[in-house]
Amino acid sequence: MTDKDKPETMAVSVGRMSEAHFGVVNTPVYRASTILYPDLAAVKANTQPYTYGRRGTPTTRSFEEAVSALEGAARTVTVPSGLNANALAILSVCGAGDHLLMVDSAYEPSKIFCERTLKRFGVETSYYAPTDDIAPLLKPNTKAVFCESPGSLTFEVQDIPAIVKAAHAKGVSVLMDNTWATPIFFQPLKHGVDLSIQAATKYVGGHADVMLGYVSANDSHAARLHDTHGNLGLYASGDDCFLALRGLRTLPVRLARHQETGLALARWLAARPEVARVLHPGLESDPGHALWKRDFSGACGLFGLVLKPAPEAAIAAFVDGLQHFGIGYSWGGFESLVIPAHIRRSTKPFAAEGPVLRIHAGLEDAGDLIADLERGLIRLKEARLKEKL
Ligand SMILES: Cc1ncc(COP(=O)(O)O)c(C=O)c1O
């Protein structure tokens, strides 16, 4: 591997330990609690690479090393879910008496963690709108700024380099949930972010069968992250890390297809009379397009859709009858999904002309998906007319 290798090349080669596994290409699943030492001298020296299951096995280490290479990180730790990764990143930086500046477009459970759990431990959270200048919002006790770009319900793109500049000028750490782009389309640490967070449950796993999260740190945040991870007793299973590492190998190829199909659906929907607006930074008309183009090298298959006002029954007629879109939370698997978006804002309300839906473009044929959506919008129109009679 060289510095110049593209993400596609890196995803294939990083984190392989074939020589330690008889030439086997994929690091096998290690399930371990006890790990034996050869003698007391080895216990005393404490130089064994693996000491106890919770502190890592060759499977977890392979995944973490692969991710660190893609993220450009000093260290990566794995945890049981993406939400846990967000919580861990915050806990490894903030303590009692500190203030956290949180983006209002963040994943709702991340916000709830701050409002309920962090609060009990004396950390105050306030929100900023995703496109706000954060400089005037930093307080003397602000310890961290949390970003999620684009927001996974409303898709505003944040100016990460500007946020990093303002935060670092005051010694404040920057944390970013980068699940939408993955390290294939955006590398937070290379843009100055201190902790890069990923719900590997989504695209990295890629097959809707893994719950996993990770946090990757730069040099200055690696020790604190590792220490907090250890003290909390966090551990991700070998089975899930194995599946996620397997997913990582094909991530760039899958993302290219998700991107292509997502953009095709977004463009088609944007031209429909039933649709008020499509929330997709890859569309030239999107307010975040210029920033996205400047900083990101691609878009995944997740985007939003604001419908023109329609009664609930008409929305149900549209969504319930879809054949290729499952109704479900989560995203990033091979399958297309749709879910209503419930948007809660503390800064300013999200101005939507009508109901908001979130769409995940899967790996199905784009033409089949568009035909399914078209049939759905006809049902919506018919239900709306019926309601008026
Ligand atoms: C942007 C984002 N971050 C984090 C998470 C949490 O991931 P997990 O479901 O693995 O806890 C999600 C889940 O939907 C998400 O959309």
Image: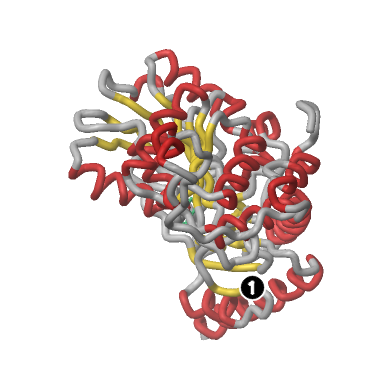
Q: Is residue 312 above or below residue 346?
A: below
For image coordinates 51% across by 81% down, the residue present is: 388
For image coordinates 55% across by 78% down, the residue present is: 384
* Residue receiving disc 1: 325
Expressed as whole percent of the image width and height from the top left, the position of residue 59 reads 59, 52
Closest to the observer, 78 or 363: 78
Closest to the observer, 2 or 292: 2
Left or right side of 269 for 92: left
Expressed as whole percent of the image width and height from the top left, the position of residue 228 reads 35, 38
| Mark 1 within 8 Å of ligand 1, using the beta carbon | no
Q: Is residue 126 above or below residue 309?
A: above
**Number of numbered labels in the structure image:** 1
Q: Is residue 263 visible?
A: no
Closest to the observer, 41 or 68: 41
Q: Residue furthest top?
A: 169
Expressed as whole percent of the image width and height from the top left, the position of residue 22 reads 75, 53
Amino acid identity at mark 1: Phe
Q: Is residue 320 visible?
A: yes
Q: Is residue 25 above or below residue 69?
A: below
For image coordinates 49% across by 28% down, the residue present is: 194
Expressed as whole percent of the image width and height from the top left, the position of residue 61 reads 57, 45
Q: Secondary structure at mark 1?
A: strand
Left or right side of 366 for 355: left
Q: Is residue 293 above or below residue 308?
A: above
Q: Quadrant of the N terminus?
A: top right
How is the rendered protein coloured?
secondary structure
Left or right side of 3 for 206: left
For image coordinates 71% across by 55% down, the residue present is: 26
Mark 1 is surrounded, within 10 Å at the Cα level, by few (under 14), some (14 to 19) or many (20 or more) other residues, namely many
Left or right side of 84 for 21: right
Closest to the observer, 6 or 169: 6
